[in-house]
Amino acid sequence: MGLRDLVEQDLGAILEDSATGFGWPISLTDPDGLTDETLVGFSDDIAQSIDPDTGELVSGRLASVALRISTLYAAGFSLPRGVADTSKKPWVVKFNDINGRPHVFIVRQANPDRAAGLVVCILEGYDE
């Protein structure tokens, strides 16, 4: 087994293990309506971001999820991506925060790492 294969295998233990890893239940729906409510990955939702003009911390919302690409493919998905055209259906991501409150987002940007087998999606709050 090569190093890349080992990284992808370890990624499953780190991202998808909800007992001892970072695993957190995540629901994903693609623009065609394919939904999987059983995905497990890493999610975050924080209240600070960096102003690109000044480099200063500002109050804002920065949410993202990290998912294993092989799991997405096994569930029948392609790689998520941002949909700029607001007349088209977006990729929708749902997860609960640590207090059990549900939150709904759309994918604004997706950053796949095809060497490690991971995609990080930058999210934006969404009202269904």
Image (cartoon, rainbow, N blue to C red):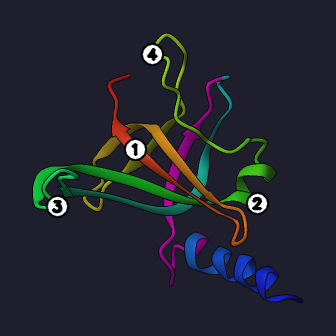
Label 3 element class: loop
Task: Give the residues in magenta.
Answer: 16-31
Q: Distance between the Cα atoms at labels 2 and 4?
A: 29 Å
* Left or right for 109, reference 98: right
Q: Disc 4 marks which amino acid?
A: Thr
Residue that badge 1 annotates = 123
Q: In the rendered image of this protein, does residue 3 appear above or below residue 31?
A: below
Whether label 2 touches label 3, CB < 8 Å: no
Q: Distance between the Cα atoms at labels 1 and 3?
A: 21 Å
Residue that badge 2 annotates = 70
Q: In the rendered image of this protein, does residue 115 appear above or below residue 3?
A: above
* Residue ranking furthest to the front: 53
Residue that badge 4 annotates = 86
Which quarter of the figure has residue 118? bottom right
Where does the C terminus fall, quadrant-wise? top left
The residue that appears at 17% across and 50% down in the rendered structure is 53
The picture places residue 95, in percent across and down from the top left corner, at: 41, 49
Query: Looking at the image, which is closer to me, 119 or 17?
Result: 119
Residue that badge 3 annotates = 55
- N-terminal of the pair, mark 1 or mark 3, is 3
Where does the N terminus fall, quadrant-wise? bottom right
- N-terminal of the pair, mark 4 or mark 1, is 4
* Left or right for 59, reference 96: left
Q: Distance between the Cα atoms at labels 4 and 3?
A: 30 Å
Q: Disc 3 marks which amino acid?
A: Gly
Q: Distance between the Cα atoms at labels 4 and 1?
A: 15 Å
Graded by Cα atoms within 10 Å as few (under 14), some (14 to 19) or many (20 or more), the crowding at tag 3 reads few
* Left or right for 7, reference 57: right
Q: In the rendered image of this protein, does residue 70 appear above or below residue 59?
A: below
The picture places residue 82, in percent across and down from the top left corner, at: 52, 35
Of marks 4 and 3, the one in the foreground: 3
